[in-house]
Amino acid sequence: MSSKLRAGIVGGTGMVGQRFIALLENHPWFQVTAIAASANSAGKTYEESVKGRWKLSTPMPEAVKSIMVQDASKVEEVSADVDLIFCAVDMKKEEIKALEEAYARTGTPVISNNSAHRWTPDVPMVIPEINPEHLEVIAQQRKRLGTETGFIAVKPNCSIQSYMPTLHALHDFKPSKVVVTTYQAISGAGKTFADWPDMVDNVIPFIGGEEEKSEQEPLRIWGKVTEEGIVKSEQPVITTQCIRVPVADGHMAAVFASFEQKPSREEILEHWNSFQGRPQQLGLPSAPKQFITYFEEENRPQTRLDRDIENGMGISAGRLREDSLYDYKFVSLSHNTVRGAAGGAVLIAELLKAEGYIQPK
């Protein structure tokens, strides 16, 4: 325990908070020592606070059952005994912004699953394999917040992680126009089929705010760090439709893409199969060894068969072929609550630790 960093989970009773707790069980670098939630949950043990509401198929880790849940609004108390915080709260956007900045000002690194700070110019929004250089903007943020050690780093929307890695691996060929339709699992809304019986045998062709995020957030991740913070890229042009489907976990994307320099099919597959990012180079604990896995079978990837590839941290792709309107079309898949949510945030924290941004208090 003494060699591990102490992690707090703010918003620990929700579905993403539960996923954080499950993923951090026996983690080699981090150990959950504090859990915070709303005032209604505070003062109970974690087991009591989520009784009847544990949403994961794996059992609740024994180590967290007796942890007393704290009031997330009592920032000084929660941050006093942790080295970093994972944040996954369900609050209004401005309230989340204020809460996360309050934690950062205590000198505590905050790795956020929330959307509130995704467009704050000096807050890095990171997919560790794609834009680790954006961590450089933390120096600007610390100056603004008046802290030497605290900061906020955010994970992007879960939907884009089903297709952005496959496009990023082809960045040498300069993607120019992209059309994406995502087929998104109900856990992306924090639901199970028991919670949401209306989703059984049903498809809903709208997810509030999702299409704007899916079109714009990739451009910020492909942007550049400047003296004014991160400035988004103008290319490629992306248009999306986001659809809720009756699947428990796993976001699938149907992608159509054109390039300034059209690659061959063989070049695409070689780039996908060989792509490695900073997490693979560093050998981070949660990093998938094979980031992108391509299936030659015509009926793969499938959510139920392939969402857990590389412990849910890998991206799978299939059905690559030339298109009559665009250069190519393909399908790709990610696990939305692992790679797309808590697991992606844990990987960000690992990268931050490895690069020296998170230290023991």
Image (cartoon, rainbow, N blue to C red):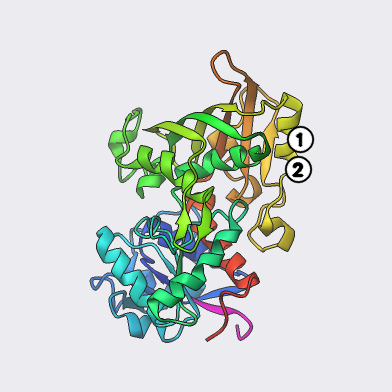
Label 2 sits on residue: 274
Q: Residue at x 76, y 27 (%)?
A: 266
CB atoms at circles 1 and 2 under 8 Å apart? Answer: yes
* Disc 1, SS: helix
> Is residue 55 shown above or below 328?
below
The image position of residue 350, as x and y in percent, is: 60, 67
For the residue marked with disc 1, what is the amino acid? Answer: Glu
Q: Quadrant of residue 359?
A: bottom right
- Given residues 133 and 313, the one toward you in this image is 133
Query: Which residues, given as a range, are shown in magenta?
Result: 1-7
Q: Seen in the image, is 219 located left or right of residue 29?
A: left
Please identify the residue farthest to the front as the structure is shown: 227
| Depicted 284 relative to depicted 161: above or below | below
Q: Position of residue 253 (x, y in %)?
A: 50, 33
Q: Which one is nearer the viewer's eye here, 175 or 45?
A: 175
Residue underneath mark 1: 270
